[in-house]
Image (cartoon, rainbow, N blue to C red):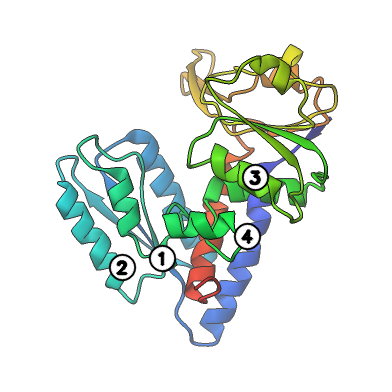
Amino acid sequence: MKIIDGKEIANQIKEEIKKDVAALIDADKKAPHLAAVLVGEDPASQTYVNSKEKACKRIGMTSSVYRLPEATTEEELLETVDFLNKDEEVDGFIVQLPLPQHIDEDKVIQRINPAKDVDGFHPVNLGRMMLGQPAFLPATPHGIMQLLERSDIDTEGKHCVVLGRSNIVGTPVSVLMSRKAKPGNATVTLCHSRTNNLEEVIKTADILIAAIGKQEFVKADMVKENAVVIDVGIHRVEDQSRKKGYRLTGDVDFEEVSKKASAITPVPGGVGPMTIAMLLLNTYKASQNEIY
């Protein structure tokens, strides 16, 4: 059984970007600039944005954060998006999700200039992805594809089962896995809460991508022998034996499923680190006009 080390792979990618950024600076060119807009004080969102800032600093990118209060109106947020769209110093930016309930996330995402949409959520980028055209790919699905590629996981002709149909992970990764590409060329089944005989479908997977948002939902008896298991979920579980008082777990029962899988991602240290690495990669591409 192989542990797919997302932390190590993410660090490899960051080092590659770091060299490219250093080359820009050595040529007296501007370092890529990634901005983030954070509305409110959601702890998970703050942690992610702080990690993004540290990652930017490590590889020589410029990072800025626009911290807006929870009471920010939709119109005020849209004005911030318009400002960043026009700011020539900013190569790419993200609006951290989730947003407060009084703000329409779709409206905000659609306001972002697709050429600066390094989260890859704009309909233009998603549409180009669907067509196999150059696009900013959503960070987590893109990270999953990099994990598979850099771990030498063969996907061609394999049956890939994706658990969860969110626009952020499940749906885009199902598209990427089915595309005529490497990795890709898989036969994909996209499962969700209304899927009949869900456990039976999961058992047919050569490659299982779990993004269903349910703690340790996938048990060993659901998984085919020697399947590749990618666990996208992350859940905080109280554990007084740990210094922090909690431990992190995923959508997969790692301890039991790892005994049957040929390769598996841990939580933490699997898919999670790849998301920021892909965000940095998209920002570098935006700075070099590689997509638009």
Answer left or right for 242 relative to 218.
left
- Identified at 81% across, 21% down, the residue is 224
The answer to which of marks 2 and 4 sits earlier in the sequence is 2
Answer left or right for 92 relative to 253.
left
Mark 3, other Cα within 10 Å: few <14 / some 14–19 / many ≥20: many
- Dot 2: element: helix
For the residues labelled 3 and 1, the Cα–Cα distance comes to: 22 Å
Q: Are marks 1 and 4 in contact (CB under 8 Å)?
A: no
Looking at the rendered structure, the number of numbered marks drawn on it comes to 4
The answer to which of marks 3 and 2 sits earlier in the sequence is 2
Could you tell me residue 53's position as x and y percent?
Answer: 42, 55
Could you tell me residue 21's position as x and y percent?
Answer: 55, 73
Which residue is labeled 3 in the image?
Answer: 144
For the residues labelled 1 and 4, the Cα–Cα distance comes to: 19 Å
Q: Nearer the viewer, mark 2 or mark 4?
A: 4
Residue in front for this viewpoint, 220 or 201:
201
For the residues labelled 2 and 1, the Cα–Cα distance comes to: 7 Å
Amino acid type for the residue under numbered disc 3? Ile
Amino acid type for the residue under numbered disc 4? Gly
Which residue is labeled 1 in the image?
Answer: 116
- In the image, residue 82 above or below residue 227: below
- In the image, residue 31 above or below residue 111: below
Which residue is labeled 4 in the image?
Answer: 132
Q: Are marks 3 and 2 in contact (CB under 8 Å)?
A: no
Q: Are marks 2 and 1 in contact (CB under 8 Å)?
A: yes
The answer to which of marks 2 and 1 sits earlier in the sequence is 2
* Residue 255 makes an appearance in the image: yes
- Identified at 33% across, 46% down, the residue is 106
- Dot 4: element: loop
Which residue is labeled 2 in the image?
Answer: 85
Amino acid type for the residue under numbered disc 2? Asn
